[in-house]
Structures are given as structure tokens and as C-alpha cells.
Amino acid sequence: MSAYPYLKILLLLVTMTLLSGCLGGGGGSSSDLPPPDAAAPQANLTFMSAAGIGVTDLDASVALYTDGMGMREVGRLIRDNRTEVVLESADARGSKVVLMDFTDGIGRNFQQNPGKLVFYAKDPQAFAAQFTAQGGRITVPPAPQPAFGNVVVGFGRDLDNNLIEIVGEPDATNSFFGAFGIGVSDLEAARDFYVDVLGFEESQFLRVPGQYDEYILTSPVPGSSAVVLMNWTNGSVRNYTDNPVKLQLDVAYPTDLADNIRQAGGDVPRAPAASAEADLDGALVSYASDADGTLLELRQGIRAYLGAAGIGVEDLEAAVDFYRAGLGMTEVTRRTRDDREEVVMQSADERGSQVVLMGFTDGVVRNYRQNPGKLVFYVKDPEQYARDILNAGGRVTVPPALQPGLGVTVGFGRDLDNNLIEFVGSDDAVESYFGAFGLGVSDLEAARDFYVEDLGFREVLYLPIPFQYNEYILQGQGGSALVLMNWINGSPRNYTDNPVKLEMRSMSPEGFAQAIEDGGGQVITPAQPSSDKDRTDETVGYGKDTDGTLIEILRAPWAKQE
């Protein structure tokens, strides 16, 4: 449950002068999110949330992309002129793929798309075998490339002749969609449009002699697949105009981007507005196109993560001492707010979200001992961790023990304010890190819909703990996981207005606040420049979820310009 892994750009270099007649690849970048940094002006961030391709036989293509390429169907939408099937990679990494079945009767050529789809696979040979078994065609079997560290690369064609590139990736659990290539008639002009107007970043220029030139573009927003601009140089005739493909772009400020596209001479046939299409539930949608007529579907983007979890404590200094000595955390900073003092704590391994200990100063009586959630730590040595908890004045309620069904060692304890502490043995930990924050909710399914459907968190796992609680484990774009918990053991639990808060960092704080309101939550303070002395130029807003849990809305560090 540590920071969500992002796509790698390392293997992009594999394609350079690869094999005569072979085609290249793309990807994204991989790193842990940096901690929040100094304030900077807002950036109108854009990333590719989905790549859409037109198909001639929707059912057959769905079967190939799921059974043959390991993807899973996560949605099916009826649009004005098409049916869309939304697919997610087996590893739930990167952008989604949308298969589009057009229903408007207009003839389209699906066989001449001059782009490609790049998949990274743990076992390229197995991926190729599955692909072939479901009707795909392998044109170059996956094979190690000695000149590039023996990275395995192969190529194939799907049912509509789309080029599929397969790249071996040891970091993959199974496979994931790493890059989407689109053909462009003027490579330099396309590069300028996608970088200077749309806000992508040029990561690499590659020249595959006798085949094509390409620019690999990534987004400052982590977690999405790369966009690859391709222009063929092998003398073959390519159709670059009005291909049945689309780039679904999530944008921090869609209206501003639409204006920039117009100012750059681009076409924006539909300005950002709430969609009337039933399946889109009023989502903000705009349509534009690049110089070659590739459809750009602009959506409101709010990509976010849990930056910090805040818990109220009765004795601030005692709590700081316990989290330092008992849980291995270090103090980062102290902050004074209108009704509280805050101490920000960071894990020993400097991974995951921060923990904020809140000592309230407004005189309002609060119950700190009935928080129905939990804090989860991943630790190198569970037995020593249990001793540290005891020595610091906490309680160990369930000594660490191997859980046969899970294959991990798990223990439970309580901090000085009776907060449930779960600690899990992990070979990945150097010392320990804060991996997840459990939030008690009165209606588990409704809370899941609010945080997933409205706030954009990804559902990782539904986990029932017999005779204790049921929980959904959710992941944002980085940070620690968010766990929604509803107790089923018959004990009374207070799920409303607990002294806890979620610090959410988003690419668009304003859009995130709107999403809270649209999901049935409450916006207390709109996202706006803060007046706090220690938050110069920071954008801060406050809201509440449907149980009254405080949500502090902040800008993500990668959403700030240098």
C-alpha cells in the first residue's frame, strides 16, 4: 500500500536502431511523489486518461483485449455516435484503453491507423501466446535485444491491424498499457502543439532508421501512459488525417485549455460544458482536435492522493513522543491553525503519506477515544515494533503472528488515544512506513462510491474481516492507501464528525471541491489562496464527506510551476 508505482520511461530507449523493420515503444516515468514543497503558481496540467481506438467488431475486440491481453472491462458507455467499452490494464497501471464501436453509419477505415499501442509485460512470451490464441497476429516474436541489455521486445497486430508492441518489464506484476502512438503528418508542428499548447513534456526524440521518427511525451501528472507522436520515414503511404482514434485528456482547467487551443488556431467544436449524454452523468466535457483531426476529448481532471491523515489527540506533546518512540516517525514541522496546533510526522522510511497530530485549542469537547478507523504501518521487524509500542506507553492487543491465508505477519495495538494501530511485516521496509489510513464510515457502499466514483480513488480490494469489519482499500495517485471501514461485530461505533481529517492533494483543488459537492458532500470553504502565514500562495479549501469527516483540499506538488 505504499506509493502507487508509476510508469517507466527507461525502456523507451530500446527502440533506437532496434531491428530492421521493427517498431519502437514508449512509457512513462517512475518515482515516489515528492513531499509538498514551497508554493508556486498553478499549472494547467493535462494527462491522457484514456486512449480510444475504433473497432469493426466490438465483441471480438473486447475478447482479444481482455482474454488475449490481460485487460479488464471497467465500464460500458452509450455515447452520441458510438458505444465505448472502457478497459483497464491487468496491473491497473497507466491510462485506460477505450474500444469504440461507431453507430452513426459513417464509413470509417479501421485498418490504416499509423500509430501503435505499447504494452509492458512480465512474461512477453506468455503475453504473445495469449494474444495469438484470441486471434491476434504476432509479426515479430518477442526476443531479447543484446544491444539493449537483453530487453525483450516483440510486435503484433490486433483484429483491426493496430500495431501492438510488447516490451518485457520485470517490474510488471502481469502487464500494463504503457504508451499510445498516434501518426502525425508534421512531426515538429505536432510536437509544438502537444507540448506548448496542451502542456505535455518532451521526454525523448527517437529516430528508428528506415522506419519512423517519434517524440515521446509524458505528463507532469504521474501515473498515466505516454503519448507518442509518430511520422513514418520508410516511404510507405500513411493516412494521418481523421483516423478513428481519440485522446481522452483530463485537464485541471478545461476552459482555459480550450481557449489556448483556439488561440493557437486549433478547432474546438464544443466548449467545456456539462454533458447531456446519460451515461456521463453531467460530466464536464469538451471536444477539440489536433491539426490532423485526431479527436481530443477534454474532461475535468482532479487526480488526487492522500497527502496526510490527521488525528485529534488529547495531549499533543505526549502523542508526539509516542509516534516518535513507539512508531518510529519523525517530526517534520509544526503549524498553528485557527482552532488547533498541528505537528506533522513522517515515517522512518520517508514513504507514504504524513500523519498530522492535532491538538485542538478552541475549547470544544471532543471524543478522541472512539475513532472507528485505524493507522497501518509496514515494518521490517514486527516483534521489535510491538516492543517499541509497549515501551512508549501504548498497548499491543494482538501480538504479531503469521497469517497463513495472507502469508504475512500482522499485529494490532492502540496508541495513547486508543487509535487502532495495525502493523504488518514487510521485507520491502527498511524500518517502517505509514501505509494506510482507515476511516470509519456509516454506509460502506455509499462511501466507496463517493471516494471512487466522485473523487477518483481506485478500488484496490474489498476485504471482509469476519465478525469484525468490512473494508474497501482505495489508492490515490501516490501517498498511503485510504481504507473505508464499517464494523459488523455489533459494537456501537461513532462514524460522524470524528476529530480526524484527510489532507487531499489534487491537480485541481477547485475541481476537487466541486467533485465533493457533486458527490453529496459539503464544501465549507472554496479552494482559494490561503491567508495562513505558513502557506503563502498555497491554495486551500475545506469540505466534508457524507459522514462529516473533514477534507482539507490542497494542490499537489506536481501541480505547481517552477
Image (cartoon, helix red, strand yellow):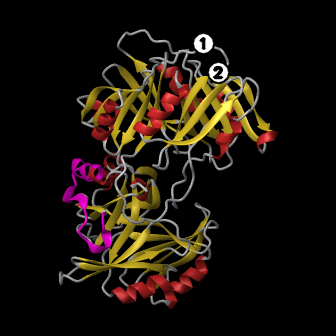
Q: Nearer the viewer, residue 408 or 490?
A: 408
Left or right: 84, with 185 as reference point: left
Q: Which numbered circle lies on residue 303? A: none
The spot of residue 487 in percent (x, y) is 35, 65
Give yes or no for residue 190 being in the magenta stretch: no
In the rendered image, the vertical position of residue 28 relative to residue 553, given as above or below: above
In the rendered image, the vertical position of residue 298 relative to residue 41, given as above or below: above
Q: Nearer the viewer, residue 399 or 167?
A: 167
The residue wearing badge 2 is: 233
Q: Which numbered circle lies on residue 237? A: 1
Which residue is drawn at the image coordinates 44% and 58% (left, top)?
A: 464
The spot of residue 203 in percent (x, y) is 57, 43
Which residue is drawn at the image coordinates 74% and 32% (left, top)?
A: 17
The spot of residue 108 in percent (x, y) is 45, 12
Q: Quadrant of residue 545?
A: bottom left
Which residue is drawn at the image coordinates 43% and 70% (left, top)?
A: 354
In the rendered image, the vertical position of residue 546 relative to residue 501, given as above or below: above
Mark-to-mark CA distance, 1 and 2: 10 Å
Which residue is drawn at the image coordinates 58% and 60% (left, top)?
A: 405
Span of residues in magenta: 511-537
- For label 2, the crowd category at 10 Å Cα-Cα, with few meaning under 14, some 14 to 19 and many 20 or more, is some
> Which corner quadrant holds the C terminus?
bottom left
Q: Nearer the viewer, residue 139 or 368?
A: 139
